[in-house]
Image (spheres, rainbow, N blue to C red):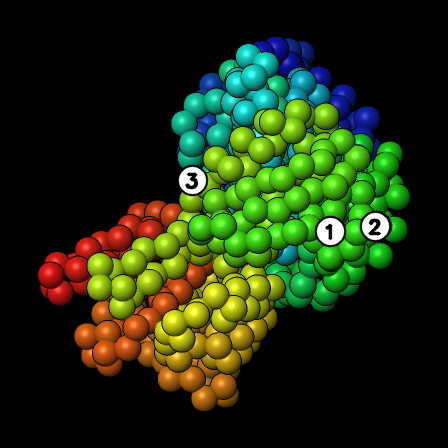
Amino acid sequence: MVNFSILDYEKALKEKNLLVKTCGFDQCKENAEISFLTYDSREVTDGTLFICKGAGFREDFLRDSVRSGAVAYVSEKEYEVPVPALIVSDIRKAMPVLAEKYTCNAWKDLKITAFGGTKGKFTSTYFMKSIVDEYMKKTGGRKSALLSSISNYDGGKMEESHLTTPEAVELHRHILAAKNNGITWMEMEVSSQALKYHRVDNMRFNVGVFLNISEDHISSVEHKDFEDYFNSKMKMFAMTDHAVVNLDCDKAEDAIKAASASHDITTFSIKNPEADYYGYDIKREGRGYIFKVKGKNINGEFEIGMPGLFNVENAMAAVTAAGIYGIPEECVKAGLLKARADGRMEMFASKDRKVVAIVDYAHNALSFRTLFKTIEKENQENRKVISVFGCPGDKAQNRRRDLGTIAGAHSDMIYLVPDDPGFESPADISEEIARYVRAQNCPLEIVDDRGEGIRKAIFTPDREGDSVIVLILAKGRETTMKVGSNYITCKSDVDYAGQFISEYDEKHS
């Protein structure tokens, strides 16, 4: 990787009209090489260009960085430290410019497929990765990179993620690592926050897929209203070469208008035969589905091993993207059949069949409606539905109303548990959700330990004798809980489900 001088970063910021002024420059300092870029003072090493970013930034972080070897900093204001400064008008807009410079525009060497929407981004991204990986196996390439709300992969080990789309610095680091590891394809989720707050500025996506939209992330720190949320998502198309739109989603017409910013537009649907890629003859097969596709470059029968009709829609998004790339149909078939999105509709059943536990990442209104509709349709044994979930703190306050109302209307019992409370009280969040659950006349219990809530739900037959479906929602295979600004290690919902089903079986053997 090329090490640039502070003057090179100054020039890059000037070209984007972001540089306000420079401070503390002299010839010696101007020629100092930048060997690292970060906004985390704990990461600073010799030769670092430090970024003063975020509401949580304190001047002490900058002073610590200088002591640790930072040779310059970027900020919206000047501080009294003995290193040069690049003062910018907007630190968020500056970050992708700096990150691109640091990585020498490594994103240009990858084929990047981006998925946006309120729900289904991770599963669609995972379907696409599985397809591309089959294609790479056939052509001798490396497995593709992945950036998602659940996990990231850039050629090293698969790591748990904390943001749907990383901040620009981490995003471009992952892209550079992927390139250095010989990877040529990347699939990624693109969130409304990433688009609104400039994390992906200046990049281009080869294919950008819009899945769906419903009200979410409306809060004082995210989107002020639905219009802002939708318009933020539509920013994706201005940086996309080939746009894909789901005709079955709300606001499809508006999305197609926004997609005109791309070079071309391709549509898909499981309802409208006029779509460019049409999924039809959808049939339940085992725990998944078989369906046929009629499309521009792909025509055939496909199978997925994941339950839920909504996953056929997610698969169609990946099929459409694969068709645009010209990936052979055999790779599409093999990729879809092999794909398993960990933490999505993962099922556990007790030996006496009285308990069926389903772990899923559903965490917003649209995913809750879709999930409960699926459970209602497929609950042939008329089992009682027990739901275990919570809501995150510090954001998306409308979810507390929406999830409480939806789950309350479709559950026989609800356990409200912590879910990334951040700086809020988990009990206060649960009590707010409970107001909407009670309005649906659904019984509930607030449990301050997530694992204990799951255990109580799974052992329902011991108390009431009923056969149950236990829905364990939102965190899937995540192994951390955000408390304050820290991520605390914890068991995943999948681990809890497996553990308590085993304990239930042992008790009843």
Query: How packed is label 1: few (under 14 Cα within 10 Å), some, or many (20 or more)?
Result: many
Q: Mark 1 — residue?
A: 269
Looking at the rendered structure, the secondary structure element under dot 2 is: loop
Looking at the rendered structure, the secondary structure element under dot 1 is: strand
Assign the N terminus to one quadrant of the image: top right
Q: Mark 3 — residue?
A: 160
Do the residues under discs 3 and 1 have CB atoms within 8 angstroms?
A: no
Q: Amino acid at mark 1?
A: Ser
Do the residues under discs 1 and 2 have CB atoms within 8 angstroms?
A: yes
What x and y, as percent, mark residue 111?
67, 25
Q: Amino acid at mark 3?
A: Glu
Question: Would residue 26 appear left or right of 267 to someone viewing this image?
Answer: left
What residue lies at 27% left-to-right and 64% top-to-bottom?
Answer: 353
What x and y, as percent, mark residue 225?
72, 66
Q: Amino acid at mark 2?
A: Glu
Q: Nearer the viewer, residue 195 or 205?
A: 205
What x and y, as percent, mark residue 144?
55, 25
Q: Mark 2 — residue?
A: 274
Q: Earlier in the sequence, mark 3 or mark 1?
A: 3
Q: Earlier in the sequence, mark 1 or mark 2?
A: 1
Query: Relative to 360, does residue 77 appear above or below in the rendering?
Result: above
User: Splitting the image into 4 quarters, where does residue 6 fall?
Assistant: top right
